[in-house]
Amino acid sequence: MASNHKSSAARPVSRGGVGLTGRPPSGIRPLSGNIRVATAMPPGTARPGSRGGPIGTGGVLSSQIKVADRPVTQQGLTGMKTGMKGPQRQILDKSYYLGLLRSKISELTTEVNKLQKEIEMYNQENSVYLSYEKRAETLAVEIKEFQGQLADYNMLVDKLNTNTEMEEVMNDYNMLKAQNDRETQSMDVIFTERQAKEKQMRSVEEEIEQEKQAADDIIKNMSLENQVKYLEMKATNEKLLQELDTLQQQLDSQNMKKESMEAEIAHSQVKQEAVLLHEKLYELESHRDQMIAEDKSIGSPMEEREKLLKQVKDDNQEIASMERQLTDIKEKINQFNEEIRQLDMDLEEHQGEMNQKYKELKKREENMDTFIETFEETKNQELERKAQIEANIVSLLEHCSRNINRMKQISSITNQELKMMQDDLNFKSTEVQKSQSTARNLTSDSQRLQLDLQKMELLESKMTEEQHSLKSKIKQMTTDLETYNDLPALKSSGEEKKKKLHQERMILSTRRNAFKKIMEKLNIEHEALKTQLQENETHSQLTNLERKWQHHEQNNFVMKEYPGQSIH
């Protein structure tokens, strides 16, 4: 019995029913969840019967078959299947459950092995995919190059088929070459600018790091109290910066709200009127508050009198102080004027020729000023004289015309009268000639005076320029004299400059040493990168591709020269 129990420990009850493991066969689902499993029977009972019916000697099944227990397949309902013939496991002891656990463990180990194999396959496929991806990128670059070469060859074949002249092809070639040259130049410029910017960024970053290191050194050299204060100030600074950021955000949001409100107000007239009324109300309220404050501040007449007396006293004191300041300023002005006069005397002593020229220019300037001041009066006088002479000429011409008419009217004239009239006529003609000559002289004088005026204006502009230049020179000389008179100040400034230059020299020497160290590090890194490049497969592939590219360029050049040879 023990052997039979052991052999039938992991065997199912029937082919079509539910086994001891509790799993239904594949493709079958129960109508309800109340599937009953065959329980263990006592040793005196017989096994269940087959489809033909129960055996006469044994007992019947403990559970009756119901319609709800029939399983459902995908094609519909089927009949209940009976268990297999033969002995069954009747007692579920420890060995049975150990067998179940072993079977489950074996299944789990097989699944784990399968998953590990799948993971290894996936990793291998991933590594192969990365290598294939790199290879695909290199092949894509080669394909692009070959596509460009193919386009060039197709273009060459089209040109040959269309019987285009060599000049047109050369013109196109020259145009493309010039365009490519321009683009390469622009790319070079951009590349150089980028390198310069990168250098500037690196230098700035190095300076920032140096400044940080210097600040850290200073902080380390500080005392503990100063370090604590520094940390506290740093924390407060960070807090204030955060608060500033929040306040800035609030301010930006408020500005946005203000702009939106202003836009809304601009679109609606009612809101504009409301804003104006609000502003008027605010002004009236402020005026009311001022009036109330003034009313409260007003006291009794005696207090007001005392206030006025205090104000008068304060004003008198201020006036007296202002007068004192004015007298001091006047004294200083007089002193400066005396100093300027002394400087002028010194300059006159040192610069004789310049002073003579300056005096001559001053005289000319005075003459020009007097001429310019009296020009309008003289001009008006001359114009009045001219108008009087013209009026006299007109009156004389009228008188002559009247006399001629009288002579025509008179038939009989004596010789004496005729002589008198001729004498009068000659006298008047001479007067007319004189008046005409005077008018001509006046016009010429006016033109000459206008030319003189233009010349004087030019001279005035020159004189003003020379005056400004001389004043600037005088100021420079006075400043130079003040600076050179104060020799100890000059010595101290020179020593300070010397100290500053010495400090700058020390700083630059330290920076030079630091840059030397950085350059050594960079050279070492450069050499290491060179060795890595030489050992790298991609670099060797690139060199091979460059050789191929040169070979294709040579072939392209030969193909370009070939049509010219055929023409010749």
Image (cartoon, helix red, strand yellow):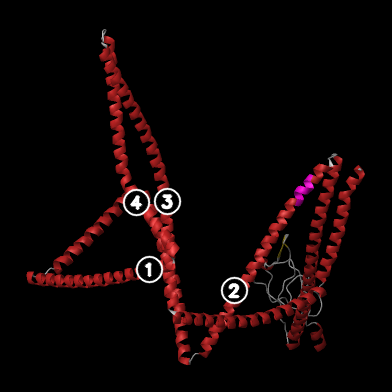
Q: Is residue 95 above or below residue 80?
A: below
Name of the residue lying farthest toward the top: 411
Q: Is residue 270 above or below residue 61?
A: above
Secondary element under disc 1, as helix, strand or loop, is: helix
Quarter of the image with the N terminus is bottom right
Residue shown at 72%/82% (left/top)? Answer: 41
Question: Residue 109 at x, y = what percent?
Answer: 77, 80
Q: Quadrant of residue 36?
A: bottom right
- Residue 176 in the magenta stretch? The answer is yes
- Residue 209 in the magenta stretch? The answer is no
Q: Amino acid at mark 4?
A: Asp
The disc at residue 345 is 1
Q: Which residue is mark 3?
A: 459
Mark 1 vs 4, N-terminal side:
1
Q: Give the extent of the magenta segment.
A: 171-177
Residue shown at 51%/87% (left/top)? Answer: 219
Mark 2 vs 3, N-terminal side:
2
Neighbour tally class for label 4: few under 14, some 14-19, many 20 plus, Cα within 10 Å:
some
Q: Nearer the viewer, residue 558 or 309?
A: 309
Question: Residue 99 at x, y = what percent?
Answer: 77, 84
Q: CA distance from mark 2 to mark 4?
A: 63 Å
Which mark's residue is nearer the viewer, 1 or 4?
1
Q: Nearer the viewer, residue 288 or 269?
A: 288
Q: Amino acid at mark 3?
A: Leu
Residue shown at 64%/80% (left/top)? Answer: 512
Q: CA distance from mark 1 to mark 3?
A: 26 Å
